[in-house]
Each structure stands twice: as C-alpha cells, then as structure tokens.
Amino acid sequence: MATPSLTLVGVGPGDPSLLTLSAVEAIQKATLVAYPVSKEGEDGIAAHVAALWITEEKRRLPLLFPMVRESEPRQKAWKEASEKLVSLVMEGEEVAFLCQGDVSLFASASYVLLYIKAHHPNCPIRLIPGITAISAAAAVGEWPLSLQNDHLLILPTPNDSESLKMLLDDAFRSNTVLALLKLGRRWTWVRPLLEKKGLLNDSLFAQRVGFSDENVLLASKVPATDRPYFSLLLIRQSWPETLP
Ligand SMILES: C[S@@+](CC[C@H](N)C(=O)[O-])C[C@H]1O[C@@H](n2cnc3c(N)ncnc32)[C@H](O)[C@@H]1O
C-alpha cells in the first residue's frame, strides 16, 4: 500500500472539462476531499467545479479561508487548515485539497504548502497544476497572451485610477501585456480610464470563465457596472512588428 499523502489539486477555472487527467486521478484516489470556503456553511467553488468526481463514499471537508484583510484571522485559518490536513494524512487518509484555477497562482493551496513545508516537512505532499483563469480567458477570447519579446504581468487590479494609470504607462513603455485579476467592482472606474486612454478595444474582459454564465468580450462592449469577483481583464497596448 502506498503511503497516504496530501495532494494539492488545481481544478481549473470553472468548467469541469478543464480539469487535467492528473487532477481527476488524484480526486478519484482520495479517500477525503478538502476544499476552501470563505464562509461557514458555504459550498466551495473548487468543490463545485470538481463535483462530478467527489463521489458519495468520499469524506468531504470544507476548510475556512476567510477573505479578510487582517493578518491574524488569515494566519489562524491557514494554520488550522494545514494542521487538520496533516492530521488526516497521519490517520491514513489519502487527502486531496482542491483549489480553483492553478494551485500556485493567488491560491489558498500556496498557504497550505508553505505552512506544511515549514512545520511538517515530512508530510508527503504533491501539487497538480491547474488551468488558470487567465489562460482560459485568453483561449475563449482567441487572444494571444504574449508573443516574442512581450512581457506578461499578472497582478491584482490596483485600488485607484492613478495607480492603474501609472501601470498602463509603464506597461506601454515595456511592451507588457497586463492581466488584471480581482477586477469586480473596480470595473466602474477602470472602464472610464481605459476609455480615456483609447484602450477599450485593446482589452479583453472575462467574467466567470468556464461557468454556464461565462462572458468574455472586448472591454468596449461591457458597461461600467459592478462585476462579480470572478472577473479579470487582459490589456495589450502594442503588438510585435513581425506578425503573420
Ligand atoms: C484569488 S485569484 C485565484 C486565481 C486562480 N488560482 C487561477 O489560477 O486562476 C481570484 C481571481 O482570479 C480571477 N478568476 C478566477 N477564476 C475566474 C473565472 N472563472 N473567470 C474570471 N476570472 C477568474 C478573478 O480575477 C478573481 O478575482
């Protein structure tokens, strides 16, 4: 019998057909499937995406990862979740911890990984990468992310328009394509700024990629209203000289 282990599994952006074969195998092999939730009693989004493979005989474990700014409750949650996962592996469970998108990109799985490597270095752990929302958005929008000498910068959307303006100016100077995550409500002021800079037709807006209400379209077609947390923006201000 193989030694029980913990597998951090990226389940992709939302469409169950975008789980990798390795992700599906890890979930099928697991005796216990854990997943992050932001509130008690909530159904985790990662669990929802992987629902087809979380069969009835498996134990399920929602783990609280509160979405707050303060450090203390977040560190407490990372510690509690990681300790729980390690103790389950010690008890002999084969554990899969699910993570929406990729396990290494703004992911709860990264906090689990860092904590366990620091405090339980002997706990067997492995990671399965997932398709990121950025790659999925680029594919749906038929939008090349980066080419030749382009740079690609992935970051959360800045909190104010002055910071975004500076970012856009720097990106223009350095041939950098921007992938702005956590767009949501910021869209109400991001759109007018893009319009002012003439960038609405150079920006791809993607909302809930991979879900049944997916919406991926040029930013010019999206009104400046609040958007869900699962929304992002890709901005390209220039193209390489040599193109087909
Ligand atoms: C905490 S990050 C998680 C990123 C995720 N680990 C990944 O690899 O895509 C959450 C942000 O990713 C973006 N995002 C994640 N899934 C998305 C989706 N299905 N559609 C659009 N944006 C998404 C949104 O910008 C959201 O605010």
Image (spheres, rainbow, N blue to C red):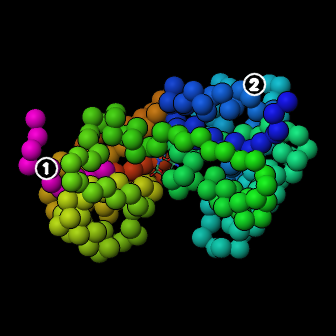
| Location of residue 225 in the rendering, given as x and y in whole percent from the top left corner | 36, 53
Looking at the picture, tell me which residue is in the foreground, 213 or 53: 53
In this picture, is 50 found above or below 219? above
| Location of residue 57 in the rendering, given as x and y in whole percent from the top left corner | 83, 25
In this picture, is 61 found above or below 212? below
Looking at the picture, tell me which residue is in the foreground, 119 or 111: 119
Q: Main secondary structure of the magenta part?
A: loop
From the viewer's perspective, is the residue at label 2 or at label 1 nearer?
Answer: 1
Q: Hey, which quadrant is residue 68 in on the image?
A: bottom right
Q: Which residue in the protein does label 1 denote?
A: 240
Give the Cα separation between the discs numbered 2 and 1: 48 Å
Position of 179 compared to 19: left or right? left
Amino acid beneath label 1: Pro
- Residue at image coords 60%, 70%: 69
Position of 92 compared to 165: left or right? right
Which element is circle 1 on? Answer: loop
Which element is circle 2 on? Answer: loop
Quarter occupied by the N terminus: top right
Q: Is residue 40 visible?
A: no
Range of residues picked out in magenta: 234-244
Q: Which residue in the protein does label 2 denote?
A: 55
- Residue at image coords 31%, 50%: 234
Q: Residues within 10 Å of mark 1 (few under 14, many from 20)?
A: few
- Residue at image coords 38%, 67%: 158
